[in-house]
Amino acid sequence: MAESPAVPRVASPKERAAATRSLGRLDWSTWPRYEAAAVGFRNYWYPVTWSHRVTESPIQVTLLGETIMLLREQGRVRALHDRCPHRGVPLSHRMASQEFPGTWTCCYHGWTFDLESGTLVAAITDGPDSPICGKVAVKTYPAEERIGLVWIYIGDDDPPPVESAIPAELVRPDAVVVGRRTIRTGNWRFGAENGIDEGHAKFLHRNSLWTLKRQMPTWVRHHMEPTEGGWITRVADQVEFDTEFPGLGPWPPKRRFWRSRGRGGARVSIRMPNALRVEYATWTHFEWWIPIDADTHIYLQLATQAGRGIRAARFRLYYWTWIRWVFHGMFNEEDALMVDVMDAPPERLYRPDIAITEWRKLCESDARARPQVVPDDRPAWLRLQESAAGRGGGASAEDEAPSAPAEQPVAVVASYRVPTDAEAAVRDDTRLRRRSSLPITHRLRMLIKR
């Protein structure tokens, strides 16, 4: 006699409530401005690349979802939207050229744009009297060079002086500035939250070479304070090392004799739109997480110290032989492994996350910051098809050939949605491949621990 199929047990209301509580916060609606800023905040200057990379041959960068061509012309950096409005060919294409001084010409039909204003000044294949000249323009972006970097302003208002975006320590006359720029996967907000997060460093980095001689605290109670220059700064209230966990035992289980204790000399601060400062006794570290899109960002690290002559040379040597490889490299690459696979919300926060929530409050309170809205870059035929489907009918002749098509903005909002099985499979496969490419130093350390 065949057994009757088991009837699945229905969770009780109490069990469902407990499961919901375990998920914690399902979205970031408490901070709607921050939630909407998946690709960053407008009305700020951003450091996008090293000055030496911008030459008379154009390069393409993507900033806050906007594709930009960078070009050096008569010594000055120019920034234009990297798309010819005629047929959508990138202006940074390797076949594009400068046919007239102060201009840039698309390689497809010879549309020529003024580098200062972006206005179409010639359509070479339509003759010198082309009626379209002056009626079309490419968006231009304010661009400046400071401390060896190219800064681009993304915003709607007149840009403030670029110096307002650069920490004072970096623009001193005797400042020595060196650094490292990489492209990382993961949303820029995860990078920023990792930077100001107080709890992770003591555990994630406890075996790193950078902290080899220092015993990290087991736990810290802290609060955040506003400080000069628009920063909010972590301030420790209580620092504990060897700790007994009831029913589990002491942690850390072993005391390394070569490691010294101390509250540490680092003072960590963060400010808008995405800059972190770590002040050590003799030098200062800075980080930026510059959004490329919702899933990728530029990770810029700078190290600076005031000094000239021998002192400056000694700091450069210290950077290139130690800081760059051990701190900017191995230590902070451990953070990259976490930012890459972070998946929040949902999230269940705990006491040390006060630094993260205070950072989110800072973003929310900044009236200047406007979440970036990304244009819908899908093909026009697909947009028209979906628009027609939404109206419940086929596309008309006017729909198929609109006289003045306008890009419809789509706000990128981070909210929790249960992924489909196919999406989950792709996500898990991607994460497995990323984990298989861990830095060799991390894999060696894991092997030694085994």
Image (cartoon, helix red, strand yellow):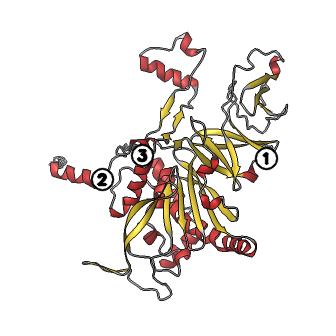
Residue at the spot 67% in from the left edge and 70% down from the top edge: 319
Q: Given the image, on which type of amino acid does mark 3 rest?
A: Ser
Identity of the residue furthest to the top in this view: 397
Q: How many other residues sit within 10 Å of disc 1, few (<14), some (14-19) or many (≥20)?
A: some
Q: Say which of marks 2 and 1 sits in front.
A: 1
Marks 2 and 1 close (CB-CB < 8 Å): no
- The residue at which mark 2 appears reads as 24
- The residue at which mark 3 appears reads as 365
Secondary element at tag 3 = helix
Viewer-proximal residue among 88 and 65: 65
Q: How many other residues sit within 10 Å of disc 3, few (<14), some (14-19) or many (≥20)?
A: few
N-terminal label among 2 and 3: 2
Viewer-proximal residue among 251 and 433: 251
Q: Does 322 appear above or below 258?
A: above
Q: Does 375 appear above or below 247?
A: above
Compute the Cα span from label 3 to label 1. Answer: 39 Å
Instruction: Give the image location of residue 214, x and y in percent.
Output: 49, 80
The dot on residue 55 is 1
Marks 3 and 1 close (CB-CB < 8 Å): no
Q: Given the image, on which type of amino acid does mark 1 rest?
A: Thr
Q: Say which of marks 3 and 1 sits in front.
A: 3
Q: How many other residues sit within 10 Å of disc 2, few (<14), some (14-19) or many (≥20)?
A: few
Residue at the spot 73% in from the left edge and 38% down from the top edge: 92
Instruction: Give the image location of residue 113, x and y in percent.
Output: 75, 29
**In the figure, residue 392 lies in which quadrant?**
top left
